[in-house]
């Protein structure tokens, strides 16, 4: 068994396993090829102490003891065997080697990289040693696999599975018995694993960010579960893995329902292959038992015992086999009560149903107790599709600690582990040292890093634009350009796995935009012009053509392209493709036919959005930002949240756009300058101004300004107004404090907003504008408040007839809607009064001077 629970009765386990195999082979007539073959370059399989080659049902050929003597260096010659034993899963467990002195197996590696080490133990009954009382350690040159290990049960067999990244030519596995006691081993496997199995970067949850250096760790498989399905034996997994059933870990089984589809319909797409998990895993899942029942709201929970003194790599496997259509399933994933993936949207990630996806999360002691809890639950709220949540597979790998131990706190060289919490710092410190060229004297760790220079460079150039949320450490950000930026754009650096969408030829885009016709320009930005284009297949696209002369442009181009390729979400504008022919820099986006939100608020002839529509737009954009902050591969700060960067599609679904631009400023000083120059004054977080430290709460502040802009329908900054009105955030907050906010509400909405809904909305906006980031809510909280405001609005309009409801929404009504007395819903007196003071209109008559300087002062300088 791969888990640590050695007291579990093996007899039942084996019986269950056996039964499942029988049932499956009987019931599934068409067996799809569950696995693509992977042929390991190193493949050492040893049946220790065995006089002959064992005959195994899975067809694998293990070497007998004699055939493997060249790998073993030991003074001991003790071999034991029993003709049979109850409850052991294979013949491998019937023989063993016993060591009373330190002994080792050593294997020549033909290839560096990931290797499985599987150790099989069963205390074979014999006259010389009582193996149930043996205590011993097992180590490689770099990693402690087992420390003072003991099986004190004569009927229990144990299989321990490890994954180690081999960097040397030899892999040596040492067995070290405790004094006067014996060590033993029944069988050993050392087998190459594919490089793609574990990438270098995982995601952390608290704080949200990325966790680099996964490839420098060793792992022990604690749990590998085929959620909602039967045991999958090693025969059915091309990497020889066993996937257990999740049933025994599922809490409150009544809440969970198993679902399955034929494995044949699972379609692997880029980034995931059967090497990650066989299609049998993705073809079964657990979903909410009462899914689709209105008001069902609960989590499905798995609890797994773990040792909290280690960090864990948790791999979650998902595959939408439950939805009938795309974009219907959004759900949250929690680890130990903390939001791990918010609003997971498999449709947008995989673009199709039944396409596998997995996510690696790293958790450490700060989050753990003796139990690891994994929960999936529905997103609440209007726009969140069907109420359901799924999980298809779950792997929990224990990570070696800072001294390379997977068992106990000491490393192979006797060094004691630091506190688990400081792991991140260790990795970061090594990163720094490398960036500043201090390679000397860092010892083994640097050598490990050095082995994978490409991974490092990749990550480093990523960090130069992604601005991870935990970037409070500004030195890290400042140093970002010191390495890795020499990766020229083009070539195969952007490998297909990065999902850049399709490649467009220049002529294709010339055709689409009528040779970049001036009349096709739909936007002008710092980067260049944006054109509307028609592709051959009739798709309308937005084509952003950069100015190749601009040095800044090139980095922004790379920035945006890398950024967008990583991000897919219903509320983020998606990239369709790009063109870099003839040093052109062109990005092709989905076309957002309704343009920027701002145009729907003021300054154009477009019909007014109803309050409900405005709430939905705010909710959509909040969801997009929330995804950036918490759901993306790394926490990302948008940094330029404003109403012109919120675009609306033909159904008025809001999507955030223009992230990735202007993120590449080499120093913090310039970052601040360049942001100001770009004219996003009025949205700027005053704390960011003061402390020059960017956090996700800066986006929250800007979003607060957006909310007031939506409510009041005026620009965030209007230099033409009297001084105290120039800055919307200040002005609105003044009125809010006086409790008279309704005096400045968009006159076109007067009388149409439910007062409770507006109160909730204004509260959210006010909290976003708190002076200090710590006092501001997270985007998740903002989202919740907005959804609540929408509910209040909707429930208030339910009492009315259809005819009246139409009045509320109909845009054509907007011109006349200032005559609020014609609207037959309960109108709060204060809202009626608002019409008597059309502050906005009057204000336009004033003219302002030197308003930008004023603004800076206002913002807390
Ligand atoms: C495993 O493989 C065997 C033989 O190929 C097949 O009969 C059985 O149905 C498979 N079971 C599972 C769960 O994959
Ligand atoms: C182990 O073997 C001894 C004799 O060698 C026998 O007496 C004993 O019952 C055996 N124990 C088990 C658990 O099989
Ligand atoms: C689901 O679990 C999370 C974390 O434990 C919790 O915050 C949330 O309230 C739960 N949701 C429901 C509906 O119980």
Image (cartoon, helix red, strand yellow):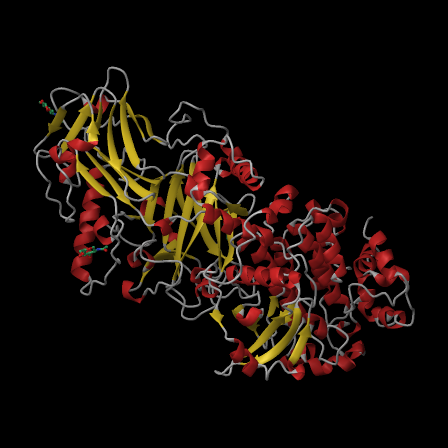
Is residue 844 visible to the viewer in this orientation of the structure? yes
Front residue of this view, candidates 660 and 492: 492
Is residue 288 visible to the viewer in this orientation of the structure? no
State whether residue 433 is above or below residue 646. Answer: above
State whether residue 722 is above or below residue 360. Answer: below
Q: Quadrant of the N terminus?
A: top left
Front residue of this view, candidates 168 and 379: 168
Image check: 275 left or right of 288? left
Percent x, y of residue 741: 80, 61
Task: Report which quarter residue 292 is drawn in.
Answer: bottom left
Percent x, y of residue 46: 18, 37
Residue at 66% x, 49% y: name it: 695
Image check: 805 left or right of 357? right
Front residue of this view, candidates 573 and 109: 109
State whether residue 693 is above or below residue 297. Answer: above
Percent x, y of residue 495: 44, 60
Residue at 21% x, 19% y: name it: 100
Residue at 54% x, 43% y: name it: 206
Image check: 294 left or right of 726? left
Image check: 67 left or right of 299? left
Percent x, y of residue 398: 39, 38
Front residue of this view, candidates 415 and 301: 415
Residue sitting farthest toward the top: 180
């Amino acid at each position: 068994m791969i888990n640590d629970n050695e007291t579990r009765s093996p007899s039942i386990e084996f019986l269950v396993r056996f039964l499942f195999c029988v049932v499956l082979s009987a019931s599934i007539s068409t067996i799809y090829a569950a696995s693509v073959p992977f042929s390991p370059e190193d493949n050492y399989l040893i049946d220790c102490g065995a006089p002959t080659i064992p005959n195994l049902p899975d067809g694998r050929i293990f070497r007998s003891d004699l055939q493997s003597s060249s790998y073993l260096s030991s003074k001991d010659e003790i071999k034991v065997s029993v003709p049979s034993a109850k409850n052991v899963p294979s013949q491998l467990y019937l023989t063993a080697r016993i060591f009373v002195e330190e002994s080792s197996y050593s294997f020549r590696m033909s290839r560096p990289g990931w290797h499985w080490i599987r150790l099989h133990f069963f205390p074979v009954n014999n006259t010389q040693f009582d193996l149930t009382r043996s205590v011993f350690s097992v180590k490689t040159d770099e990693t402690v696999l087992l420390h003072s290990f003991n099986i004190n049960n004569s009927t229990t067999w144990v299989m321990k599975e490890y994954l180690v990244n081999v960097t040397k030519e030899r892999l040596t596995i040492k067995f070290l018995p405790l004094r006067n006691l014996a060590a033993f081993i029944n069988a050993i496997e050392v087998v190459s694993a594919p490089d793609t199995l574990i990438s270098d970067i995982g995601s952390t949850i608290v704080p949200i960010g990325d966790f680099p250096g996964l490839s420098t760790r060793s792992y022990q498989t604690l749990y590998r579960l085929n959620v909602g399905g039967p045991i999958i034996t090693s025969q059915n997994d091309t990497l020889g893995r066993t996937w257990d059933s999740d049933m025994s870990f599922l809490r409150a089984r009544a809440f969970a329902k198993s679902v399955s589809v034929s494995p044949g319909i699972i379609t692997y797409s880029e980034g995931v292959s059967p090497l990650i998990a066989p299609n049998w895993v993705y073809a079964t899942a657990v979903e909410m038992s009462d899914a689709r029942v209105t008001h069902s709201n609960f989590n499905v929970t798995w609890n797994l015992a773990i040792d909290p003194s280690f960090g864990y790599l948790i791999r979650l496997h998902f595959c939408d086999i439950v939805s009938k259509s795309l974009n219907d399933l959004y759900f949250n994933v929690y680890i130990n009560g903390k939001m791990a993936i918010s609003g997971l949207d498999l449709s947008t990630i995989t673009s199709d149903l039944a396409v596998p996806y997995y996510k690696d999360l790293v958790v450490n002691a700060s989050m753990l107790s003796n139990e690891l809890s994994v929960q999936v639950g529905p997103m609440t709220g209007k726009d969140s599709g069907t109420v359901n949540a799924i999980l298809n597979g779950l792997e929990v790998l224990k990570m070696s600690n800072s001294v390379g131990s997977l068992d106990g706190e000491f490393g192979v060289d006797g060094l004691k582990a630091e506190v688990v919490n400081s792991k991140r710092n260790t990795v970061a410190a090594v990163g720094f040292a490398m960036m500043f060229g201090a390679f000397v004297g860092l010892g083994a760790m640097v050598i490990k890093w050095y082995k994978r220079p490409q991974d490092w460079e990749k990550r480093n150039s990523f960090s130069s634009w992604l601005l991870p949320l935990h970037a409070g450490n500004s030195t890290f950000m400042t140093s970002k350009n010191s390495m890795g930026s020499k990766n020229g754009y083009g070539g195969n650096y952007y490998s297909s796995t990065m999902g850049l969408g399709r490649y467009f030829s220049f002529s294709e885009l010339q055709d689409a935009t009528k040779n970049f016709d001036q009349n096709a320009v739909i936007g002008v930005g710092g980067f260049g012009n944006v054109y509307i284009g028609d592709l051959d297949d009739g798709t309308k696209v937005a084509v952003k053509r950069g100015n190749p002369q601009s040095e800044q442009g090139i980095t922004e181009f790379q920035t945006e392209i890398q950024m967008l390729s990583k991000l897919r979400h219903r509320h983020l504008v998606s990239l369709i493709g790009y063109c870099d022919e003839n040093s052109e820099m062109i990005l092709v986006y989905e076309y957002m036919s309704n343009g920027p939100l701002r145009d729907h608020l003021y300054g154009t002839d477009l019909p007014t959005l109803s309050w409900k529509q405005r709430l939905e737009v705010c909710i959509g954009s909040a969801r997009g930002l929330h995804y950036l902050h918490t759901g993306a591969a790394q926490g990302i700060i948008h940094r330029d949240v404003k109403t012109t960067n919120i675009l609306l599609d033909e159904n008025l679904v809001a999507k955030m756009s223009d992230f990735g631009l202007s993120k590449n400023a080499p120093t913090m000083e310039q970052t601040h300058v360049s942001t100001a120059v770009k004219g996003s004054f009025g949205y700027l977080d005053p704390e960011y101004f003061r402390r020059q430290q960017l956090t996700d709460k800066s986006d929250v502040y800007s979003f607060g300004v957006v909310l007031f802009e939506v409510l009041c329908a005026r620009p965030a900054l209007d230099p033409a107004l009297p001084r105290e009105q120039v800055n919307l955030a200040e002005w609105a907050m003044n009125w809010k404090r006086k409790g008279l906010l309704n005096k400045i509400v968009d006159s076109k909405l007067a009388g149409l907003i439910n007062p409770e809904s507006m109160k909730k909305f204004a509260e959210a906006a006010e909290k976003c504008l708190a002076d200090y980031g710590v006092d501001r809510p997270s985007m998740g909280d903002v989202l919740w408040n907005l959804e609540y405001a929408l509910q209040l609005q909707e429930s208030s309009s339910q009492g009315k007839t259809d005819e009246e409801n139409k009045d509320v929404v109909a845009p054509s009504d907007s011109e006349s809607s200032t005559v609020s007395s014609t609207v037959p819903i309960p109108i709060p007196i204060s809202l009626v009064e608002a019409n008597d003071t059309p502050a906005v209109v009057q204000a336009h008559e004033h003219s302002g001077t030197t308003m930008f300087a004023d603004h800076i002062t206002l913002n807390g300088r």
